[in-house]
Image (tube, helix red, strand yellow):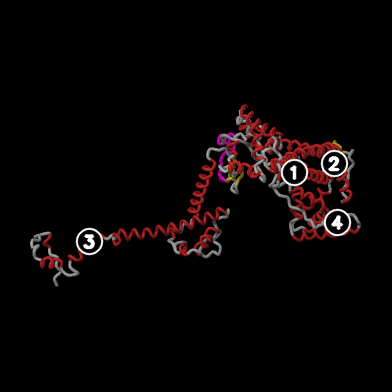
Amino acid sequence: MQQGGRDVFVTRGFDTWSKKKSLKDHEGKVDSRHNKAKQKCENLVKKNQSISEAFHKQTEVEASNYQIRLRATIDTCRFLLKNTLPFRGHDESDGSLSKGLFIEQLSFLMDHNEIIYNVTLQITPKNEKLTSPKIQKEIVQCFSKEIIKFICEEIGKDVFVILVDESSNVSKKEQMTMVLRYVNILGIVKERFVGVVHVNDTSSLTLKEAIDSVRGQGYDVASNMQGAFNSLKALILKDNPSTYYVHCFAHQLQLVVVAVAKNHDGAEDFFEQLALVVNVVCASCKIKDIIQESYKGRVQKEIGNGEIDTRRGLNQEISLVIAGDTKWSSHYKTITSLKNLFPEAVKVLNYVQGEGSSLHNQNQAYGILSYFKTLDFVFYLHLMLEIFGLIDTLSRHLQRKDQDILETASLVKVTMKTLKALRNNGFPSILEKVFSFCQKHKIKIVEMPECYVTPRNRRTKITNQHHFEVDIFKTVLDMQIQEFGNRFSEVSINLLEYMSALSPCNAFSMFDKSKLVKLSELYKTDFTALERVYLDGQLETYYHSLIDDERFANLKGIADLSRLMVETGKHCSFPLV
């Protein structure tokens, strides 16, 4: 069969253009060389049928699948980060029933979305699952960078506050936690967590070099942070006297008690024994049942003898409260419950001493019982109960979310005066309560003029009167009062009082122009003498402008006032305010 397609075009040439038959002979049949070449040429010209296009289409599909997987992984990370949930699981193998929240959440998305289902986890290649811990961390870091970028853009060139705390993790590495507090362009107060970073050096000089332009200070009790001489607080105050130190008052109140517990030997022993007795008495359900039954029987007996009242709400079941390690106000409940359950606590300790599960527990119970029989224990019990009772009102107020600043400052001053009054005149009443408690529970009472004998039966040269009144009562209260004055300084209290004059609560009832002028005098670098003159008149106009505006009638705090002033444009009318 003739194939056609001779070599005329490349060797001899083609010269018979006028003969149609010759062209047809050259073209040949369907499977001729000419037609095959023609078909290949047409295929080459058609882009959609080329080899490169076929590869390109395959690459587009893979890229689309990769984007779907990546989006699902990012959405899973976003969900876990937003809800502060852990990522990893203990066992993430295919046969595990609980693979961790990251894999489980990704599986949940896969089960409820067919598109995601077709390209994730088991269906995707093992080297493209996008589920490895390294990829999770990289995505989290991307979120972190975007959030910090947004925070920086939101702050702009305005002032902001840095809240820093230091702690060590389980591997004993020093870490620093940072939070930024600022007011955005809408006047809304924002607090944004920035991160936790490892630091090699936390000396005050190093921290000072890292901090520029500070508006205020507030640190914890670390000596390198708020000490009197070479601390970060002192270094910053040296450069700028207007960067006043104000710490969380609720935390400060806790630190007042901590200072006494750590620096007075007798008080330290008392709190150590208090922790021990709570651990022993609350060791098991059986011991708790013994306490409840014993207390119930004692209450019924005292009611029958007419010793206690039977009004509604009285004589409820109580238990020995476990004190918190960081919340010292909880010790007030612990001491109160121990005083009320003292007979039951003694009964339980006698039981543990005789039938304890180990020799250590028996010896521990014996030591606590020996301490309970001393007048020192009873005196510390009533003294601490009295001190905690005096500061309890202030402690409760400081833990409220809707604090009244003026009431806070007033309570701080009143508490200080009450402690001083107790120190000067309270010893006889405390001693009377101590003797009454000892008589009720058959604890030996000593004569005050006699020489004091230590719990280890060592006779001293001082009298019992001097030991209990001077060495314990006045010393503990002097330490409390001194620490109270150091923690709640006059400057910080005045600063709060002056700031309270800006409060819009109750139709600006706390507005006081004189206090706001004094507040401006504390910040000498922010206001010139001429601006203070203008401020006096501007405050008057500011007050009447806002008091007559219904939009400012029901505000709940300075944060709401700041937001609404920006919304209404009044921050431009009163720039000094």
Residue 346 position within the rendered picture, expressed as x and y whole percent measured from the top left: 82, 54
Amino acid on which the number 3 mark rests in the picture: Cys
Disc 2/disc 4 C-alpha distance (Å): 43 Å
Tell me the distance, in whole angstroms, between the alpha carbons under discs 4 and 3. 107 Å
User: Is 429 positioned to the left or the right of 320 in the image?
Assistant: right
Residue receiving disc 4: 311
Give the mark nearer the N terminus: 2 vs 3: 3
| Amino acid type, callout 2 | Val
Mark 2 vs mark 3: in front:
3
Three-letter residue code for mark 4: Arg
Please report the bounds of the magenta region as a residue range: 193-210
Q: Quadrant of the C terminus?
A: top right
Q: Are marks 2 and 4 in contact (CB under 8 Å)?
A: no
> According to the image, label 2 marks what residue?
453
Residue linked to disc 1: 394
Question: Badges 4 and 3: C-beta atoms under 8 Å apart?
Answer: no
Q: Nearer the viewer, residue 283 or 324?
A: 324
Distance (Cα) linking label 2 and label 3: 116 Å
Disc 3: which residue: 41
Residue 559: which quarter of the image?
top right
